[in-house]
Amino acid sequence: MKPAIALEGISKSFPGVRALSDVSLALYPGSVTALIGENGAGKSTLVKILTGIYQPDAGVIRVGDTEATFPTALAAARAGVTAIHQETVLFDELSVAENIFLGHAPRNRFGLIDWKKLNADAAALLQRAGANLDPTIRLRDLGIARKHLVAIARALSVDAGVVIMDEPTAALSHKEIHELYALIERLKAEGKAILFISHKFDEIFRIADRYTVFRDGTMVGEGLIADVGQDDLVRMMVGRAVGTVYPKKLVEIGEPVLTVSGYRHPTEFEDINFELRRGEILGFYGLVGAGRSEFMQSLIGITRPSAGAVKLDGKVLVIRNPAEAIRAGIVYVPEERGRQGAIIGMPIFQNITLPSLSHTSRSGFLRLANEFALAREYTSRLDLRAASLDQDVGTLSGGNQQKVVIAKWLATKPKVIILDEPTKGIDIGSKAAVHAFMSELAAQGLSVIMVSSEIPEIIGMSDRVIVMREGRIAARFERSELTAEKLVRAAAGIEAPPEGRAA
Amino acid sequence: MTAKLLKNREALLVVAIAVLVALIALRFPAFVAPGNLARVYNDTSILIILALGQMAVILTRCIDLSMAANLALCGMVAAMLNTAFPGLPIPLVIVTAMALGALLGMINGTLVWKLDIPPIVVTLGTLTIYRGLIFLLTNGKWINAHEMSVAFKALPRLDIAGAPVLSWLSLAMIALMFVVMSRTALGRAFHAVGGNPHAAVYTGIDVGRTRFFAYCLSGALAGLSGYLWVSRYAVAYVDIAAGFELDIIAACVIGGISIAGGIGSVAGAVLGALLLGVIKNALPVINISPFAQMAISGTVIIIAVAVNARAERRKGRVILRKAEAV
């Protein structure tokens, strides 16, 4: 059978990172191909190339028999490639029909939108997608699953031959997922080529016909689902030596510093219990959306848990807002550093001293000399290179902004530091520096919680690992028993093979 | 050096004001006499005080449209207090006006903080409410010069060391705001909340509370301005300073305070107000009709915004090593 669309020898680099190198992928009409890989394996980059958002540095895209280029998203859409994203990219305030036909609405002979035809066509498409929806209602009144159906109807409206589904079930309930499966079967029957991206193995084995596995930007395996087992796929995903390059220092683990018991939230997580000891790096692994960041934000008082208690150094602590967490000695370095980290437009030193102003001021007045001293101390510890400390943070590179954010938190002299995806989106050199520094902190007696979705980082840096899945703790591992396969299994909820053991 | 100076908004404004004054002096040399310049400053004092309050609010990504209405209500209450109790010491009247102003600001701040209503909607609403309250208090009646006590009217004009109290008060407020902005945690929080509200939350800053304090500050300064306005012009009625909120915001915008929040300085607010003050004082002198004056003021505002927009344009990501840390 000839593929509906084929990528051959595709490479794509970003400054400092090689995202894809010489990968190939073929999608066949009437079949579902699962794209599998860890976070950062290059799946999203590939999707963006397929949909015309990124241009590959090398390689060819073939649609049918002809070579094609997708310089814009529109060009990809014209070639019949459409994507349904994890979070639907639709317009809440428009009607269902308008969403379906946005950009290619039928026109009447005056060039105005033909509303009658628009709504009739939309109703027909919705019927095909298996949704009995009134096309005139506003999108915001629909649930997520129904919105997905609208997105699918939109995909049908452009007569797409290739449908990309990027973790379509991440936000769906159990019943909705089964409706989605039924829909995928219908699309298959209509001869669409479907690329299905998922972390969940049960889904992949339920719905996919073929698989392609990516690892570190290269394709490491492909074939028919019928020919492989879960273990083979896991091995392909993680198959590499890890742990040797990480600058993990051997630290005497001390007494418990932080004890969390019975933390729960009505919608985000429940039953979170753990202990964090002095000098320990505790890794939190899980798939994106497993509730790790949500729990951390609740721990530092940004959201309120519905139940739960925290003890720090043996004393029960009530944390109602981030200021109280900082005062108690718990700091959180957030994941989205662009949005939640540095304050662009403010000088470096002011960024660093912002949470420590009570230490650098006297009788309510700030003392600039103290501020500069504090900022200088921590920027030099982190080896930050900047012309002067009163220049705008915005003039620094991403890696150096990162250092400013970390310096800001260290300057508060915390007991517990929570690092959420500390090396996401930074180059390899800066990564190594962050790891070395993290190790150094633990050696100095700080307790570190590291939330990370990168398996090598988790294995390389953690003393203990907690794996979260769907808002609960799925497994706990000591450093000695850590393997990539165990982590992947626990995070994805795959049962252990007979010879292994999952906690 | 010059290139760096041109990048500095405050320096640019000083140059703009100097050029403007020089141009006016060409046609009307008496304008630059020290006595006259001092008069222009005195005339602009109230606008400066108000712009300082508005600056704090705008820095936190909010806006206070109710300042002029707040001013009018506080001014009216001050005048009524004075007519009812002519013996009441004037400093007490001023403190009352400021306290009332702060209270009105707190109402704005609470609505923005606790109910999470967009600031422009809140203050548009309170603007009409505060004006309406004046009417309810007075039934639309004016309080005229002869009803006010001599001391009430005399204070702003009182000469101390060669300058009227009005000028001294505005200088004091500039000094006060300078200390607040550069030497207190609150001033730092104004910048942080406007610059990146999400990051501010993580550093332990309560975004809503910071905005609340900004509104208190702008309210108190509006209250002070209320007394100054009424005593200086010796009249109080429903519509005093109607439309003045736009002048206040214009002064801030000209002074380089970013409407998007986070960027701005006390010097900028003061210079922005002064530039507007010079224009308003000079144009009648060189015989330009009031309608042309409005057009000219508007043009200045747009030019200022265009210049600021150029300066603020996103520089893009710093990826090249050599582009870093210039």
Image (tube, coloured by chain):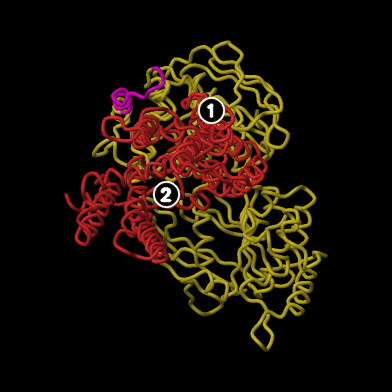
Chain colours: A yellow, B red
Dot 1 or dot 2, earlier in sequence: 1
Would residue A327 be visible to someone looking at this image?
Answer: yes
Distance Cα–Cα, label 1 vs label 2: 44 Å
Query: What residue is pinned by disc 1?
Result: B86
Q: Position of residue A271 (x, y in %)?
A: 70, 27
Q: Main secondary structure of the magenta part?
A: helix
Residue A151 versus residue A58: which sits nearer the camera?
A151
The magenta region covers A363-375
Q: How many marks?
A: 2
Q: Residues within 10 Å of mark 2 (few under 14, many from 20)?
A: many
Q: Which mark is residue B258?
A: 2
Q: Position of residue A277 (x, y in %)?
A: 52, 17
> At 39% across and 59% down in the image, what residue appears?
B297
Residue A261 versus residue A202: which sits nearer the camera?
A261
Specify the farthest residue to the front.
B146
As helix, strand or loop, the secondary structure at mark 2 comes to loop
> At 49% across and 56% down in the image, what residue appears?
A219
Chain under disc 1: B
Q: Amino acid at mark 1?
A: Pro
- From this view, report whether residue A467 is shown above or below residue A121: above
Magenta-colored stretch includes residue A169:
no
With B207 as the anchor, is A388 left or right in this view? left
> At 48% across and 53% down in the image, what residue appears?
B246
